[in-house]
Image (cartoon, rainbow, N blue to C red):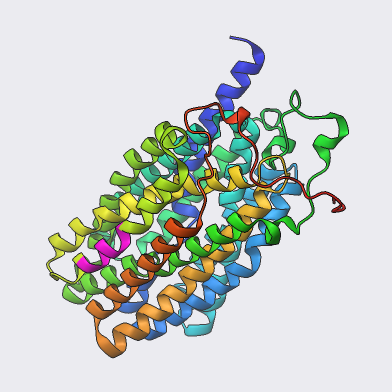
Amino acid sequence: MTEDANLKQRANRALDAANFFLADVRDGLGPYLAIYLLTEQKWNEAQIGLVMSIAGFAGILAQTPAGALIDRTRAKRLVMVAAALLVTLASLLLPVFPSFWPVAVSQGIAHAAGVVFPPAIAGASLGVVGPRNFTKRIGRNETFNHAGNATAAAIAGLAAYMFGPTVVFFLLAATSMASIASVLAIPESAVDHDVARGLPEARLGAGQDRDRPSGLSILLTCRPLLIFAGCVTLFHLSNAAMLPLVGQKLALQDRNLGTSLMSACIIAAQVVMVPMAMLVGAKADEWGHKRFFLAALLILPIRGALYTLSDNPGWLVGVQLLDGVGAGIFGAIGPVIIADLMRNTGRFNVAQGAIITAQSIGAALSTTLAGLVTVHAGYSAAFLTLGAVAGVGAAVCFLALPETCSDLGRSRRNRTPIAQPIPGVVPE
């Protein structure tokens, strides 16, 4: 094995480990926050939804700047390490200061730091494997991410059953330390930082033009990117609140088992996400990227309707398997579509930040919308409302979003970029 091949192999293994351990860190407390505030702090659903939305909006402000930072920096590993430490510290402070504003501020910090991980991991992956192998690498990233989520949820469920819901704070700290070690194991020299931001590979570049990214205005002039952003917003406006609502229903039925049952829901979804991510990595270039994204949208109205049929814990956990289909597909296909749209522009990571901003807006509004509907009309009405939102997103995707993988079955390097650098725009 050549030295370069050995370096790439080490980088790929380190990326596997980083995705596995960051799975628990990148989302912070996630749905466990709702259960902790409901059962331990006696908050109502509307208060929980509001504080989660405030924290979400704090994260929104950091999304696009985080992507721009990842495009520019050649210290991606250190940025991820700093973000992991901030997420952990903010979450560990929550039980010490459990009133409304301290919780909102601490979770806002956690959300703002956590937005670094998706563009940093995707950018580092693109810089290691290049555009031709990116779909497979993203599928592999998501496979390890979901495996990590399932493992952490299983441990959290068992530990919460034995020691109470606050144990999730200590689990987060442990996985954070492991994620930092994994990130630092990625060889710095294995990452091509120009390729990582969406510029051509050295052998495909044209001299100094390789280092001249398009102007930021491309984010507003690429119509398919704007359509995709709208669909992503609707996806997360529908999806984000469904799991916390299920967790609240389970906790109200059995306070002692609420966190453990939530872990069962997460495990059920994550187990399904693993083969979905593998399927995207193996078949998306052949079957089409839009088709996978449309399938992810269409599963949400079905899931929302099924939640209304029974309050039985076994049924709710079973329906949660559908979350694994939708979220598993979306997590793997999203960065691939963005990479298609931003190919050769040098704006891959800042475009990721912009799309994650749209995603976060949808997610932040989702918890508020669901909380208000639940308080005034009940859980079933909230699930049906969220499902209807995804139906609108599916219609927009089907009618307006072009197929980004236009030459199916052909090599990615032979395809014409959808978003070319804009002539006349002064590069950075």
Q: Position of residue 133 (x, y in %)?
A: 55, 29
| Residue in front for this viewpoint, 150 or 176 | 150
- Residue extending farthest bottom: 376
| Residue 300 included in the magenta stretch of the image | yes
**Rendered view: 111 above or below 137:** below
| Residue in front for this viewpoint, 128 or 276 | 276
**Rendered view: 182 above or below 399:** above
- Left or right relative to 272: residue 191: right
- Residue extending farthest top: 1
| Residue 349 included in the magenta stretch of the image | no
- Residue extending farthest front: 399
The residue lying at 25 percent from left, 53 percent from top is 321
Q: Position of residue 14 (x, y in %)?
A: 54, 32
- Left or right relative to 112: residue 29: left
Q: Position of residue 357 (x, y in %)?
A: 58, 64
| Residue in front for this viewpoint, 174 or 182 | 182
Q: Quadrant of the N terminus?
A: top right
Count numbered badges in the picture.
0
| Residue in front for this viewpoint, 70 or 213 | 213
**Dominant SS in magenta:** helix
- Magenta stretch bounds: 299-305
Residue 346 visible in this rendered orientation of the protein? yes
- Left or right relative to 384: residue 141: right
- Left or right relative to 328: residue 204: right
The quarter of the displayed image where residue 238 is located: bottom left
The residue lying at 65 percent from left, 46 percent from top is 342
The residue lying at 60 percent from left, 43 percent from top is 339
